[in-house]
């Protein structure tokens, strides 16, 4: 029987077993739960960061505290080797190994093999039915968090934010129309008209039934046609209202990359979220440039229109939750311009004072002068071509955005390592991120690939490593995005003496990089709408017939940080009324599970025996994984493994754009691969099995930014690109019926 068939055969989980497994997790976690308090002493000082703040490097989230769980461990696992014939591995005969797989297992103490599994839980359920010891991976726990992060963000968008956006669009369009009527025939007319078109486009994208004001019908129709075509990178008809034709046709025109409106990520399957995606993408990307006087008039008028209790409340109701999930914008935003209006024109200045007051022209010049003193964005998400001057480049990048896309630390790393700062390097590599966070192995791989040869790469990488190495916990835990990255930071550190032998070699370091990049890809996928993109220049409780006690990948730091992240997620959303009871329970259970694996990891590393309850928790892991999977995907009517083909783990996200070649960098995960590890279990060496990410990276045409559905079809049709060459250090190629390792089904 093929492994694919067997994997599906065991997909049904009995409710009673889930309850038993969850009870075991609670028992293992014990007093470690306690809302994570008492673990770290004083919680870090959380600086309140209202929507007005743009201090992206210092402010913590105002939604919830991140309370770090303490890890206390002194690793002292005795070193061991795997005999060439696997003679010292007690269950070696339970597996049929290809020569290549056996060789790698002996050499490294572990091996990863391709698999047909489309999710993690079938692998672990199969283990239980076939009495194979489980190897609980950090990959599977990180994937669990991704499922719930995506589910919770999608729920907030669908149930809360889309309604707020509709109200905001309606209010801003009405205000813009009134401003236009007042300013028609003045030098502010084109700026006011631009705003009418701007909000009409956003409104029409969210609700096709919205009536477009006659004054901008032509430009809005042209804009919507470009957005629907999703191909051309060209001048925006709306943003160039009032601009002379020769300027509109030049490099100085306000341009947009319309390929960004290809709906992707979790937005793809819902018509409401498709519309929300496009409307928010419009708000997030279009820039009113400080170096353009008429666009500054538009931004000033927009600020006056938004300075209204109802409209400002709706704006905050969208910005603040997305700030908690992803972070703040590094573009000039509403509150900064509101403060600037007060400084230049006086507190509570209205339209009349700004447009027709005493010395209006001089005051407007002063407003622009003050605006130019504001910090430019760290991340350029605007297509810029190298033939323009440095001064023009700065004028194109610095500007006001109505609801700007958000600063993220990984995009900042990318920005410092592509053309504009690193000469001629048009697209980054995923490995840039862990390398900047301190991974010497990642930097070595990049060097072997020729990525470090570009002018300024080494210098800039050194600066980023120093900067990131100096960040304190408050920075790393300011929102969910940063805290997710903080969890991944634990994968960068190479393991010291006292860790199991399979973790003490270069192959494992590369496996950790694959885990890092797989989880990071899921993060980019889940936040694709908000995060700025860089532009270059179980079954029944059957008595076991064999000793199937398993092993947890001993990374207590990752499990501790994941538990803290889960608590922060739960408490932050609950405090704002954005979390229902069912999801709260799931997050609590997942937090308990993470704490349990932290405790087990500490005991494994200190060579202490596990309890029967702890081994039962490891044994029943597949049941819990399926439970969480069903809960996270219940809005897609996923009720069992029967619908697994409709909701596989594989995802894709474009993370950087080269406007010159019209190509993007795609990051993706594929089928869940199988890992086999020789681990010390209860004083004996055993092969334990689990699931890990498969990670892909490749350039792709920008006009065809990949969606999950298209990527999954490519995987099913064997049209996916090759895996990165550096993964050969720990992975074997498929053999025979597609597997380098097959399990023996006999029960002697």
Image (tube, rainbow, N blue to C red):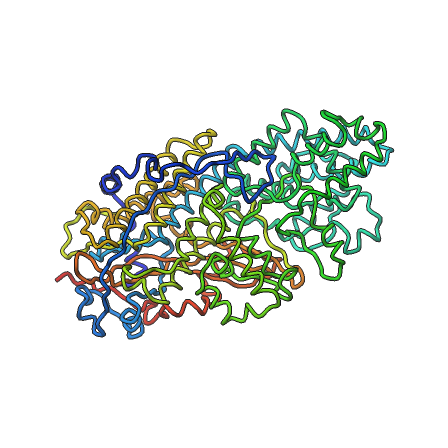
Q: In which quarter of the image is the N terminus?
A: bottom left
Q: Is residue 544 left or right of residue 151?
A: left
Q: Quadrant of the C terminus?
A: bottom left
Whether 117 is drawn above or below 181: the answer is below
Whether 86 is drawn above or below 245: the answer is below
Query: Farthest residue toward the right?
Result: 185
Which residue is found at the position 33% from the left and 36% from the top?
Answer: 38
Whether 724 is drawn above or below 184: the answer is below
| Front-lying residue, 666 or 379 | 379
Q: Is residue 81 left or right of residue 410?
A: left
Which residue is found at the position 45% from the left and 45% from the top?
Answer: 473
Q: Is residue 620 left or right of residue 300?
A: left
Count of numbered tags: 0
- Quadrant hosting residue 148: top left
- Quadrant hosting residue 517: bottom left
Which residue is found at the position 34% from the left and 42% from the top?
Answer: 590
Residue 369: image location, x then y, percent: 77, 41
| Front-lying residue, 294 or 40 | 40
Residue 597: image location, x then y, percent: 29, 47
Residue 578: image location, x then y, percent: 46, 32
Q: In this view, does 614 lie to the left or right of 663?
A: left
Residue 263: image location, x then y, percent: 57, 48
């Amino acid at each position: 029987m093929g492994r694919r068939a067997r994997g599906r055969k065991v997909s049904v989980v009995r409710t009673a077993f889930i309850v038993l497994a969850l009870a075991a997790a609670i028992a293992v976690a014990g007093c470690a739960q306690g809302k994570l308090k008492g673990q770290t002493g004083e919680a870090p000082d959380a600086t309140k960061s209202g929507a007005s703040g743009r201090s992206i490097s210092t402010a913590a989230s105002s939604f919830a505290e991140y309370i770090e769980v303490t890890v206390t461990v002194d690793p002292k696992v005795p070193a061991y080797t795997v005999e060439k014939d696997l003679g010292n591995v007690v269950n070696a005969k339970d597996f049929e190994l290809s020569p290549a797989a056996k060789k790698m297992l002996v050499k490294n103490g572990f091996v990863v093999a391709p698999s047909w599994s489309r999710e993690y839980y079938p692998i672990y359920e199969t283990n239980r039915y076939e009495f194979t010891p489980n190897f609980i991976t950090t990959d599977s726990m990180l994937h669990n968090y991704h499922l719930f992060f995506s589910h919770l963000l999608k729920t907030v968008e669908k149930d809360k934010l889309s309604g707020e956006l509709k109200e905001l669009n309606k209010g801003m369009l009405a205000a813009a129309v009134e401003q236009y009527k007042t300013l028609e025939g003045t030098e502010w007319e084109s700026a006011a008209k631009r705003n009418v078109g701007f909000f009409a486009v956003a409104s029409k994208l969210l609700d096709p039934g919205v009536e477009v004001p006659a004054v901008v019908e032509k430009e809005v129709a042209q804009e919507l046609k470009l957005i629907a075509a999703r191909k051309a990178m060209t001048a925006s008809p709306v943003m160039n209202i009032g601009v002379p034709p020769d300027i509109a046709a030049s490099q100085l025109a306000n341009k947009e990359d319309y390929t960004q409106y290809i709906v992707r990520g979790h937005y793809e399957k819902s018509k409401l979220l498709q519309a929300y995606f496009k409307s928010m993408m419009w708000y997030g990307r279009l820039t009113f440039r400080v170096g353009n006087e008429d666009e500054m008039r538009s931004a000033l008028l927009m600020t006056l229109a938004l300075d209204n209790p109802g409209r400002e409340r709706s704006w905050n109701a969208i910005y603040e939750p997305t700030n908690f999930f992803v972070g703040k914008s590094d573009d000039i935003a509403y509150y900064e311009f509101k403060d600037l209006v007060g400084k230049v024109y006086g507190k509570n200045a209205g339209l009349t004072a700004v447009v027709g007051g005493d010395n209006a022209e001089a005051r407007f010049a002063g407003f622009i002068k003050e605006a130019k003193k504001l910090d430019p964005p760290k991340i350029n998400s605007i297509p810029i071509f190298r033939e323009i001057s440095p001064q023009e480049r700065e004028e194109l990048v610095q500007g006001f955005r109505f609801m700007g896309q958000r600063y993220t630390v990984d995009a900042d790393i990318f920005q410092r390592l592509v053309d504009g700062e690193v000469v001629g390097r048009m697209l980054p590599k995923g490995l840039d991120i862990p390398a900047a966070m301190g991974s010497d192995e990642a930097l070595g791989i990049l060097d072997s690939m020729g990525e470090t040869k570009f002018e300024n790469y080494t210098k800039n990488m050194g600066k980023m490593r120093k900067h990131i190495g100096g960040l304190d916990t408050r920075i790393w835990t300011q929102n969910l995005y940063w805290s997710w990255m903080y969890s991944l930071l634990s994968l960068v550190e190479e393991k010291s003496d006292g860790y199991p032998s399979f973790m003490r070699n270069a192959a494992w370091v590369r496996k950790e990089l694959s885990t890092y990049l797989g989880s990071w890809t899921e993060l980019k996928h889940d936040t694709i709408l908000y995060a700025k993109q860089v532009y270059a220049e179980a079954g029944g409780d059957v008595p076991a017939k064999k000793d199937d006690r398993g092993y947890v990948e001993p990374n207590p730091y990752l499990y501790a940080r994941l538990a803290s992240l889960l608590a922060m997620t739960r408490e932050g959303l609950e405090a704002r009324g954005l979390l229902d009871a069912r999801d709260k329970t799931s997050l609590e259970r997942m937090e308990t599970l993470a704490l349990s694996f932290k405790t087990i990891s500490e005991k494994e590393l200190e060579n202490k025996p596990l309890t029967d309850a702890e081994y039962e928790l490891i044994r029943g892991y597949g049941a819990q994984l399926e439970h969480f999977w069903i809960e996270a995907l219940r809005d897609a009517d996923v009720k069992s493994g029967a619908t697994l083909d409709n909701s596989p783990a594989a995802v894709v996200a474009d993370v950087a754009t080269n406007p010159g070649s019209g190509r993007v960098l795609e990051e993706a995960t594929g089928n869940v691969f199988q890992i086999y590890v020789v681990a010390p279990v209860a004083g004996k060496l055993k092969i334990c099995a689990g699931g890990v990410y498969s990670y892909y990276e490749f350039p792709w045409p920008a006009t065809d930014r990949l969606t999950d559905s298209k990527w999954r079809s490519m995987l099913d049709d064997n049209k996916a690109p090759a895996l990165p060459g550096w993964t050969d250090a720990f992975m074997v190629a498929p053999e025979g019926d597609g597997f380098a390792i097959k399990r023996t089904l006999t029960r002697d």
